[in-house]
Amino acid sequence: MLAVLCGEDQARDLTESPAMQRIASTAVVRYTGEAGLADALRGADVLFVHDFLSRAVPEAWHAADRLRWLHIASAGVDPVMFPGMRDSDVVLTNSRGVFDDSIAEYVLGVILTFAKDLHGSLDLQRQSRWKHRETERIAGRSALVVGTGPIGRAIARMLRAVGMSVSGAGRRARSGDPDFGDVHASDRLVEHLPAFDYVVAVAPLTEETKGLFDAAAFAAMKPTARFVNVGRGELVVTGDLVEALRTGRIAGAALDVFDTEPLPIDSPLWTMRNVLVSPHMSGDFIGWRDTLVEVFADNFHRWQTGAPLRNVVDKQLGYVPSDR
């Protein structure tokens, strides 16, 4: 039996999905919201967390009496990574690979926005003002991508393609990486930050990466550096970022994720001239919801036929280990 955690509006769309209809022809499917998750989990072999922002799984976990596999419709697994899950025999898979190129395009877009002052041009257009300015080149500028999984690699390839110099930061230092060249150790991040014009956060949220970008990290960056976060809001100590932006310790930030979402209306980030805010949408291309369901349906077919599942998460690390 399959339990599907989704919102009410999502349930209607899911039942009409060809991929889910194929699954329903061979398995019993229970759609549920957060309130009914515990009841839906009883007797279920598989849980599909379609509502990947939900934090309801830990509270309902006591009812998972037969669960053998959990799939989440996102690359990040932190909403379902809690001690009971980590210590269980339940296999965890994610939707790695769906958002890689889209997020890389977003990162390139915000870098170009900063370099070419596109937000400034829009402000001037609204005022009907003709004001000539000179802008920056991005070719030859340096970027550090913090997080060397598939999304980080897609970002590195895209930035290299436009002439930027790219390095990575990950769990272990190494050289000769096909996408990053040099990879620096994340636990020595502050030592390497001064060398880069753009710092892109895309690391998974783990105990080691929570609060990785704090006052010390921002103080280590160039005053002309821009910070881009497309990973998780909790990678950043928000108060420290606000202070670094307010005092000019760094030149700007493009933020797609926040430690509180939606971003509170009274957050100073909304009105800072050097900040670009987007509502957790960097990877959301037209058709992404259908793609997520297709990824799960492919893995469900593998589950039914005994084939190896794709995107199996190492529950101790908190992400799918890279083969590089």
Image: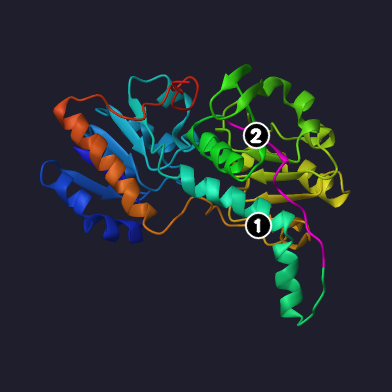
Give the residues in magenta: 133-147
- Name the colouring of the figure: rainbow
Label 1, on which residue?
277
Is residue 36 visible in the rendered image? The answer is: no
Q: If you read the primary sequence from the N terminus, does the residue marked by circle 2 or circle 1 appear first?
A: 2
**Badge 1 element:** strand
The residue carrying mark 2 is 166
The residue located at (45%, 38%) in the rendering is 75
103 or 259, which lies in front?
Answer: 103
* Quadrant in the picture for residue 201: top right
Is residue 49 highlighted in magenta? no
Q: In this view, does 58 lie to the left or right of 216?
A: left
Amino acid at dot 2: Val
Q: Farthest residue in the bottom direction?
A: 128
Find out whether the residues at labels 2 and 1 contact each other: C-beta distance under 8 Å.
no
10 Å crowding of disc 2: few (<14), some (14-19), many (20+): many
44, 156: nearer the viewer: 156
Residue 178 in the image: above or below residue 26:
above
How many residues crowd mark 1 within 10 Å: few (<14), some (14–19), many (20+)? some
Tell me if 62 is positioned left or right of 324 in this view.
left
Between 263 and 36, which is closer to the camera in this rendering? Answer: 263
Foreground tag (2 vs 1): 2
Residue 92 lies left or right of residue 229; in this view the side is left
Query: Is residue 189 at all visible to an observer of this figure?
Result: yes
Closer to us: 206 or 109: 109
Image-quadrant location for residue 27: top left
Mark 2 residue element: strand
Quadrant of the frame with the N terminus: top left
Which residue is rendered at x = 40% and y = 59% of the image? 286
